[in-house]
Image (tube, rainbow, N blue to C red):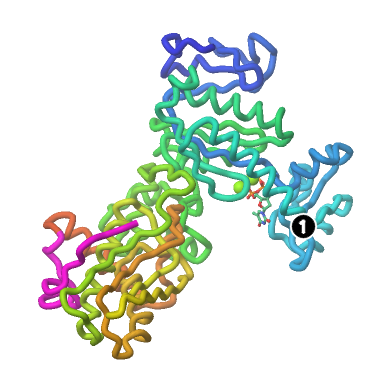
């Protein structure tokens, strides 16, 4: 067992062997215990708690496990109806095969590859086994997909008798031994950098990004590394001459927000390695909503709309505070005779903007305003996520983009002067005061 008092915190000369977990001292190239060159060393190694773990060439790794004769062969998983590559093992990748590539192209690049059609049931089963092993380390496991998850190991030293870095290295070893596939680990102080780190040394990787190096490290990376910066947005940044994260670091928050709306704020924070999103374990809040029961039943749009607006703003404020977003907008109505109607609509991207929630809610409400008298109105979002894909700047709808930017400006004023400092036309006066939202629920 590792003695906590002996942990050489902040000493880059110290580390451990990823194969036998023996502590290392001095700048040796190989493990003093087993001779392995796979040593983990970092100045912040023993105090970083946040990990992102992703399985290597997942589907292909599972197939290779089950058919050992394929171990040294290039393997492609894919085909089926769409005729594209799901994934390829690292040997096939050396030959240029990539996920999402049309199969005929992949076979042009690597004609000797063994092609296997996917067995989803099996991959789901193996993915669950890996997840169960993660959940044995900490309750704070947030799965992102079938083969990856965030883990917050903060405060688990006592439980494990060793710091997160060693728990993770041991985890990687055990996955190889017990499940028969390999994983890569990224260790950092926040989600954004942990996710980047897990990709740095694949396969069988273990990469650390500490607080000290976050800003200089990010400076040299392309903007596409930032969550939410997809092809279209990267092209928009490129038109403004911005390609590297370092350029964003040199810009002011206000300037970025004026140019890119809410996304500007994200660019500002993430480019500086500022990311305080928590790890949300499976089964946490599935929706965020607000509702209100009226003093007297209401039927007219003119009466319902201001309430909808105020509730949308309340939902949005909570989403923004938690830095999460929802992809499905849900409208709830209770009629005079206590019948509940819920109507929902899925958006192209998750949102945390009051205006988007309101606009969709308005469309849903318009169809229900058929003269029925309602005693309750609620609005909310479900399909929650916090992976940075919310509210990409709308490159098509200029009006929507302007409203999103205006909302960013209103948020900043409210931060400074309080909630009631800025009222929108919808909530000003009668509606808001006559029917204040009463309660929020998850
Ligand atoms: P990834 O984790 O993105 O990729 P990977 O595990 O194959 O390779 P690595 O992480 O080492 O880079 O995706 C996990 C699985 O999801 C992958 O094995 C197959 C499936 N997948 C697809 O079906 N289509 C895709 O376009 C991608 C990216 C993944
Ligand atoms: Mg993977
Ligand atoms: Mg993955």
Report the side of 399 relative to 415 (left or right).
right
| Residue 74 shows up from this direction | yes
For image coordinates 35% across by 53% down, the residue present is 323
Nearer to us in this view, 298 or 355: 298
Report the side of 103 relative to 383 (left or right).
right
- Magenta span covers which residues? 419-442
Judge: label 1 CB < 8 Å from ligand 1. Answer: yes
Nearer to us in this view, 259 or 336: 336
For image coordinates 65% across by 26% down, the residue present is 173
Residue 263 drawn above or below residue 182: below
Q: Does residue 429 belong to the magenta stretch?
A: yes
Total marks in image: 1
Residue 442 lies in what quarter of the image? bottom left
Nearer to us in this view, 424 or 135: 135
| Residue 240 shows up from this direction | no
Report the side of 312 relative to 363 (left or right).
left
Q: Quadrant of the N terminus?
A: top right
Q: Residue furthest bottom?
A: 371
Q: Position of residue 283 (x, y in %)?
A: 47, 49
Judged from the image, the secondary structure of the residue bearing numbered disc 1 is strand
For image coordinates 77% across by 68% down, the residue present is 81
Q: Residue furthest front?
A: 337
10 Å crowding of disc 1: few (<14), some (14-19), many (20+): many
For image coordinates 46% across by 44% down, the residue present is 281
Q: Position of residue 62 (x, y in %)?
A: 75, 43
Q: Position of residue 73 (x, y in %)?
A: 85, 42
Q: Does residue 431 belong to the magenta stretch?
A: yes
Report the side of 365 relative to 88 (left or right).
left
The residue at which mark 1 appears reads as 78
Residue 432 lies in what quarter of the image? bottom left
């Amino acid at each position: 067992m590792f003695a906590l008092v002996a942990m050489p915190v902040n000493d880059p000369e110290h580390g451990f062997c990823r194969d036998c977990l023996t502590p290392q001292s001095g700048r040796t190239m190989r493990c003093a215990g087993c001779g392995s060159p796979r040593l983990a060393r970092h100045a912040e190694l023993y105090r970083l708690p946040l990990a992102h773990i992703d399985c290597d060439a997942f589907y292909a790794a599972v197939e290779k496990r089950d058919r050992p004769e394929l171990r040294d062969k290039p393997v492609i998983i894919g085909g089926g109806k769409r005729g594209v590559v799901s994934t390829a093992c690292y040997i096939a990748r050396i030959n240029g095969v990539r996920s999402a590539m049309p199969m005929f192209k992949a076979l042009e690049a690597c004609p000797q590859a063994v092609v296997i059609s996917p067995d989803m049931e099996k991959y789901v089963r193996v993915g669950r086994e890996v997840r169960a092993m993660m959940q044995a380390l900490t309750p704070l496991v947030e799965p992102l997909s079938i083969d990856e998850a965030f883990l917050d190991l903060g405060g688990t030293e006592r439980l494990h008798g060793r710091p997160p870095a060693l728990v993770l290295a041991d985890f990687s070893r055990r996955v190889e031994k017990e499940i028969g596939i390999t994983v890569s680990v990224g260790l950092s102080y926040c989600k954004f950098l942990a996710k980047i780190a897990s990709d740095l040394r694949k396969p069988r990787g273990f990469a650390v990004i500490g607080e000290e190096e976050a800003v200089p490290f990010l400076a040299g990376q392309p903007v596409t590394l930032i969550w939410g910066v997809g092809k279209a947005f990267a092209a928009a940044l490129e038109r403004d001459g911005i390609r590297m994260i370092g350029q964003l670091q040199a810009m002011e928050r206000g300037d970025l927000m004026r140019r890119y709306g809410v996304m500007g704020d994200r660019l500002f924070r993430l480019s500086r390695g500022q990311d305080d999103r928590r790890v949300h374990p499976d089964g946490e809040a599935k929706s965020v909503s607000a509702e209100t029961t009226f003093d007297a039943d209401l039927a007219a749009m003119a009466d319902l709309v201001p309430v909808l607006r105020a509730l949308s703003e309340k939902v949005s404020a909570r989403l923004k505070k938690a830095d999460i977003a929802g992809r499905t907008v849900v409208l709830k109505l209770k009629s005079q005779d206590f019948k509940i109607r819920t109507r929902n609509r899925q958006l192209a991207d998750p949102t945390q903007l009051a205006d988007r929630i309101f606009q969709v809610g308005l469309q849903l409400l318009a169809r229900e305003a058929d003269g029925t008298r309602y005693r309750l109105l609620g609005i909310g979002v479900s399909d929650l996520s916090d992976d940075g894909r919310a509210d990409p700047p709308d490159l098509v709808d200029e009006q929507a983009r302007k409203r999103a930017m205006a909302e960013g400006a209103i948020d900043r004023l409210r931060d400074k002067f309080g909630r009631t400092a800025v009222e929108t036309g919808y909530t000003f006066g009668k509606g808001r005061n006559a029917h204040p939202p009463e309660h929020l629920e998850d």
